Image (cartoon, rainbow, N blue to C red):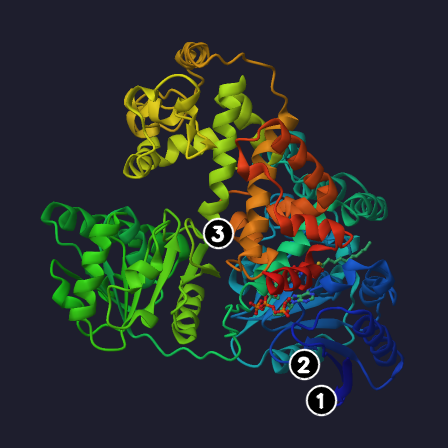
Amino acid sequence: MTQYSRVSGSVGLITLKNPPVNQLSAVVRHGIVDTVQKALSDPKVKSVVICGQNGMFCGGADIKEFQTLANMRGPPLIPMIHSIEAADKPVVAAIEGGAFGGGLELALGCHYRIAHSKAKVGLPEVTLGLLPAAGGSQRLPRLIGVPAALSLITTGRHITAAEALQLGLVDQVADHNTVDAAVKFALSVAGQSLDARRISNFQCPPVPNMDALFEDVMQKVRTTARGAIAPIACVQAVRAAATLPYTQGMQREKELMATLFTSGQARALQYCFFAQRVVGRWSMPSGARWDTSKGRPIHKAAVIGLGTMGRGITVALAQTGLSVVAVETQEKQFMEAKKAVSNMLERGAKRSGKPLAHGKITYSQSLQAVADVDLVIEAVFEDMGLKKKVFQQLSAVCKPGTFLCTNTSTLDVDELASQTHQPELVVGMHFFAPAHIMKLLEVVYGPRSSPELVAVVMELGKKMGKVSVAVGNCRGFVGNRMLKPYRDQAYFLLEEGATPQLIDQALEEFGFAMGAFKVSDLSGLDVGWKVRKEEGLVQPGGGSGKSARIRNGVRYSPLGDLMCEQGRFGQKTGRGWYQYDKPGSRDARPDPWMHSFLEEYRARHGLVARRISNQEVLERCLYAMINEGFRVLEDGIAAGPEDIDIIYVFGYGWPRHRGGPMFYANMVGLEIVLERLEHYAQANPDMPTLQPCSLLRKLVASGSPPVNKWKEVIKNVRSQL
Ligand SMILES: CCCCCC/C=C/CC(=O)SCCNC(=O)CCNC(=O)[C@H](O)C(C)(C)COP(=O)(O)OP(=O)(O)OC[C@H]1O[C@@H](n2cnc3c(N)ncnc32)[C@H](O)[C@@H]1OP(=O)(O)O
């Protein structure tokens, strides 16, 4: 797992060999210890280079080893890195591809670092619920200063070789063969004193107003962490580097890591890391899979409808380098959209430092302009009649074989497919607003969608920088389907005595970016109202008596309808579940009006307000959502719990350190979730979404297996259906 050779007469070359990313598994650590020893004891060797095979230096510790302590046997990283730093011959790290986490910590133990110009480096441990505990939190601030180290360690961001050079993190950047450059460099420094090269001997560069700096950073980190503990431990570890001698700092690093390492948050974040990769290996109920389905190249794409979503999708496509035809038939919207897209592209180019993608887009007011494209994304208003018409037209205008995609968030993809000559070439691409920024893409296949098309769209999603999840077609797909019972419970809790701020606070303390009512104000209450009106659910004035709160035998809350009747559509009208300074403002403040509105509503419906605890809010909202998640799995709409969890983490503000709703259910204990659902279902027989799903019962009956074992139980349940 490590290869050793002597090159250029006097350089010992150690190559890490552990696909896919030369992670520091026990056997690699053994190899490093042995080969370093060999090089240092060989009198012919005057200096040493460490590199990684296949153009990758090292992706850090082997995250899979963290699952079981038994796997952690083998030489520990810290003494291994110390022995490299203490070596009396210069050791040079040749960084190609990347040096991350323990990989960068290994490089920081070396006396010199040479990086390829395309390489990236970073300490992403915080994203796995950890901190750089192989000396990274102590060496990095000593090398590049406290503010820069805080920025890298608390965010885990990867930086380019150029930025690393500027910070003094690497000593040289190579444009060609990095190993050759490192060997040449190693020859040139052989025999030189290493006293000034051992970072653990450095003092942190002094920082003016250090207490104020740490207070400020801690404040910011607490706000953005939303309950995550690792970013806070990272700040504490860097503070130790800035204030304590190295050995004491290392002791502090160890103590902080001990708390994080076995935490539920670390388990959740490491689960998310692997889940994100699992969803790329998609499968369909037909048996089609990512590794047996081949897409075909897309050279030219089109977007139909340049409202908010269409504009974002146009930008996301153009930024991949594709030629894009952007179509909007309404004159006013057409002119506004051109300007808006152009501004969005400029902002994107500024942010990313990449070239502007203006030239990739041609605008048209006619659908005829899409005749020669390979793929179309329809993004017109969310109206089945309108979308059907567009699909009929597209089917007539586009060349045979063109892939047709719809950016719908709820509508039946199969019904739209049936409007075309080739229904197998239709899928849903559910983007999230703003479409050029939000990472999630739900790829919705219907029963007739071809695996080739799913492969094409999943690949396109990747090019757009999205985390794409393939899901089956049903109302609301995965994300919005599970959101409905969650929202319903929030409304029912308002009726029973809660306030919007009580519910939102409980959800935000749990870690959601925004509570259910703030989200509702942001997206606009009128959107759901329109849908409910079309479905015949809305009774003007909200009605009275028991029937006013029942639809089709199921509990219904008309509260949202009543709010809309008063023109309270949320942020856009300056009034919603909260009040805002002016329409469009985002600063939500509790509205005293809501108090009397709810009191009057409860009186009219004979409801007596009771005290609602945060725990009840979480149990009712989250367990209702999770229960629907089990139904989604049972119905085969999502291939596995990872798909659901990634959708929620990337599209719905679910706190990543809680691993997604299904992982969270597993952490709470499936038997507890089942018991609480039974309890609430019994108390509310008119809320069928609280009736525990049979898959949940089955999992509990099977001894509540860990989340990565659910697929076997799901397979059995499905085969019995
Ligand atoms: C008390 C204990 C003291 C311990 C002290 C030491 C602690 C050290 C902490 C660490 O080092 S934690 C690990 C830090 N490293 C990272 O977070 C890097 C994680 N990896 C990545 O970000 C990316 O994989 C990459 C390296 C940037 C490469 O990206 P790319 O897009 O090219 O490939 P992927 O699809 O992401 O990955 C390919 C493949 O490799 C698997 N993998 C990646 N990194 C690791 C790893 N560190 N350990 C194990 N496996 C890794 C990844 O899962 C993919 O495989 P899969 O089969 O498709 O899942």
Rendered residue at 34%/19% (across/down): 543
Answer whether labels 2 and 1 touch (C-beta < 8 Å). Answer: yes
Rate crowding at label 3 as few (under 14), some (14 to 19) or many (20 or more) other CA atoms within 10 Å: many
Q: What element carries label 2?
A: helix
The image shows a total of numbered marks equal to 3
Say if mark 3 contacts mark 1, CB within 8 Å. Answer: no
The quarter of the rendered structure image containing the C terminus is bottom right
Q: Residue 8 carries which label?
A: 1
Quarter of the image where one finds residue 239: top right
Q: Mark 3 points at which residue?
A: 478
Residue 142 showing in the rendered view: no
Task: Name the quarter showing ligand 1.
Answer: bottom right
Report how far apart the C-alphas of labels 2 and 1 lie in the structure.
8 Å
Quadrant housing the N terminus: bottom right
Residue 80 screen position, x and y as percent: 84, 65
Amino acid type, mark 3? Val
Give the class, few, some or many, for how many residues have Cα within 10 Å of label 1's Cα (few <14, many ≥20).
few
How many angstroms separate mark 2 from mark 3 (CA)? Answer: 53 Å
For the residues carrying marks 2 and 3, which lies nearer the camera in this image? 3
Of residues 463 and 110, the one nearer the viewer is 463
**Amino acid type, residue under disc 1 in the picture:** Ser
Horizontal arrangement in the rendering, residue 505 relative to residue 248 (left or right): left
